[in-house]
Amino acid sequence: MVDALRETHRVLAPGGVLVDARPDSRVVARVERPTGSRFQRYGLVETNRLTLKDDRMSDVAIAHAKRERLFKSRRRGRFWHLVPFESLAELRDYLWDHLRFARRARWSVDAATRRRHAADRFVIRRAIRYEVLSAIKATVPSTARAASDPRMQ
Amino acid sequence: MIDVGTCVPIYSSNSSSLRPRPLDELRAWGGTRLIRGRKVLDVGCGDGRFAVGLAPLAASVDGIDPDPEAIRIARRNARAAGIRNIHFEVGAAQQLPYADDTFDVVILSWSL
C-alpha cells in the first residue's frame, strides 16, 4: 500500500491532490427502517475481521506516507451512505453476499417486530471516511536556484 | 474529525448500488472544484463507474485497474455514455504507467 502511495505521489504534479475515500469500519453500520422523515434503528452490522484488518493497514499506509512527507492532510471527514432495500429479505441477501460485512445483523428489535415489518423498506446506514491530501514535492533549494539563475550571477 | 451524526445522508441510486453516486461523493469531499478542469487519475477504477461520473467536469480522466475484464466494461460504459476525455488502462497501483507529475488529482476511491 505504501508503494502505491509513493507511485501516486510520483505521478502527481506539484500542488496535486490525493483523495483517499473508503468505508469507515470504525463506525458500526446500522440497519434502519425509514418511518416518514425519520429512521428507526433495527440493528447493527459489524464489519468482518479481515476487512477490519485491511482497513487498519490502509490507515497505517496513509500515516506512513505522511511521515515520509509525501503528503500532508488538507481536509478529512465522514458522511453517511444509505443503501436502500425493498424488504428485510433483500437486506439479508445483501449481507449474505457482501464480503465487507458480517453475514448477519445484530438485531436490537425482537423477532416479532421484524416479522411484522418484513415487507417494509430498510436501509443500511454506513459511514464513509475521506481525506484530501496535498502532495509535498521537493523544491529546488534557494541557494541552488540562485546558482542556476543567470540574473543572480 | 466530523461527527458522523451531523452528516447529511447520501442515498445510493438503487438497491443494487453499493456506492454513493460519484457527484454526491465528490460534494461530500468538498465540491466539484476539486476536479473541475483538472487532469484526474482514478486508481482502482473497476468498471469505471466513478471515472465516467467525473469525466464531464474534469479536463481528462484516466482510470487504471488490474482486472482486464473490469477495464473492458469501463471502456464500454464510457463509450455508451458518449464520453471522450477518458482513458482506461490495465495496471497496478504499485507501478503506474504514467510519467512523473502527470496528474492534478489522484483518487483512491474505495481502493486503498
Image: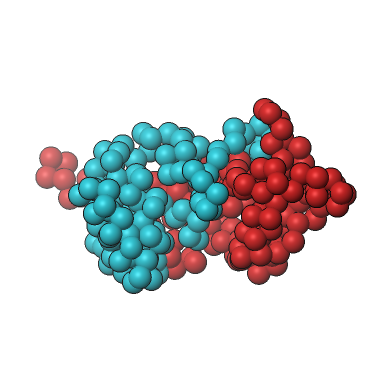
Chain colours: A red, B cyan
Question: Where does the image place residue B62, in percent across and percent down from the top left?
Answer: 29, 55
Q: Is residue A60 visible?
A: no
Question: Where does the image place residue A132, in percent across and percent down from the top left?
Answer: 47, 44
Question: Where does the image place residue B32, in percent across and percent down from the top left?
Answer: 38, 35
- Residue A93 vs B69, above or below: the answer is above
Question: Where does the image place residue B13, in percent across and percent down from the top left?
Answer: 49, 43
Q: Nearer the viewer, residue A139 or A10?
A: A10
On the rendered structure, is A98 left or right of A148? right
Residue found at x 32% / y 59% = B74
Q: Residue furthest left?
A: A150
Q: Nearer the viewer, residue A77 or A94?
A: A94
On the rendered structure, is A20 left or right of B82? right
Residue found at x 56% / y 61% = A58
Q: Nearer the viewer, residue A59 or A103?
A: A103
Residue found at x 43% / y 34% = B31
Q: Is residue B9 visible?
A: yes
Quadrant the C terminus of chain A occupies: top left
Residue found at x 34% / y 44% = B54
